[in-house]
Image (tube, rainbow, N blue to C red):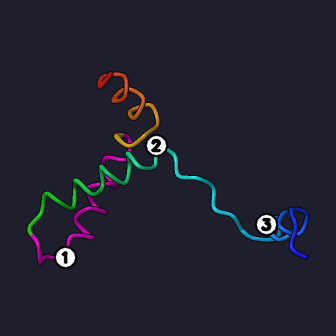
């Protein structure tokens, strides 16, 4: 019989991914905006990687908090 104890045991052996945070969504959205700046059909990955390498300080949790406060 499948009961709650079996379910807990089974879940404890699984690798469960932690939930996505609002900060992570913000970072991914900003990176998506970068991709949207360039034309369709061209290879953009290296352009975005180069841009992000020079501007990593714009993607900190502090910057996220500042933007959230500004939008309130």
Distance between the alpha carbons at the discs numbered 2 and 1: 28 Å
Which of 40/10 is in front?
A: 10
Secondary element under disc 3, as helix, strand or loop, is helix
Residue 11 to residue 61: above or below: below
Badge 2 marks a residue whose secondary structure is helix
The label on residue 4 is none
- Mark 1 or mark 3, earlier in chain: 3
- Write down the quadrant of residue 72 in the picture: top left
**Residue 70 image offset from top left, x and y in percent:** 30, 22
Residue drawn at x 38%, y 49% is 27
What residue is shown with label 3? Answer: 11
How dense is the environment of label 2, judged by Cα within 10 Å: few (below 14), some, or many (20 and up)?
A: few
> Which numbered mark, 2 or 3, is in the foreground of this view?
3
Vertical position of residue 23 compared to residue 13: above or below: above
Residue 5 among magenta residues: no
Residue indicated by mark 2: 22
Is 45 contained in the magenta span?
yes
Q: Are marks 1 and 3 in contact (CB under 8 Å)?
A: no
Mark 1 highlights which residue? 43
Quarter of the figure with residue 57: top left
Q: Secondary structure at mark 1?
A: loop
In the displayed structure, does residue 61 sit left or right of residue 3? left
Residue placed at 63% from the left, 55% from the top? 18
Q: Residues within 10 Å of mark 3 (few under 14, many from 20)?
A: few
Name the mark nearer the viewer: 2 or 1: 2
Sequence order check, earlier mark of 2 and 3: 3
């Amino acid at each position: 019989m499948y009961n709650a104890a079996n379910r807990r045991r089974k879940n404890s052996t699984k690798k469960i991914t932690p939930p996505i945070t609002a900060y992570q969504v913000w970072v991914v959205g900003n990176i998506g905006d970068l991709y949207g700046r360039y034309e369709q059909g061209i290879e953009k990955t290296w352009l975005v990687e180069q841009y992000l390498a020079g501007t990593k300080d714009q993607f900190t949790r502090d910057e996220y908090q500042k933007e959230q406060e500004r939008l309130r």
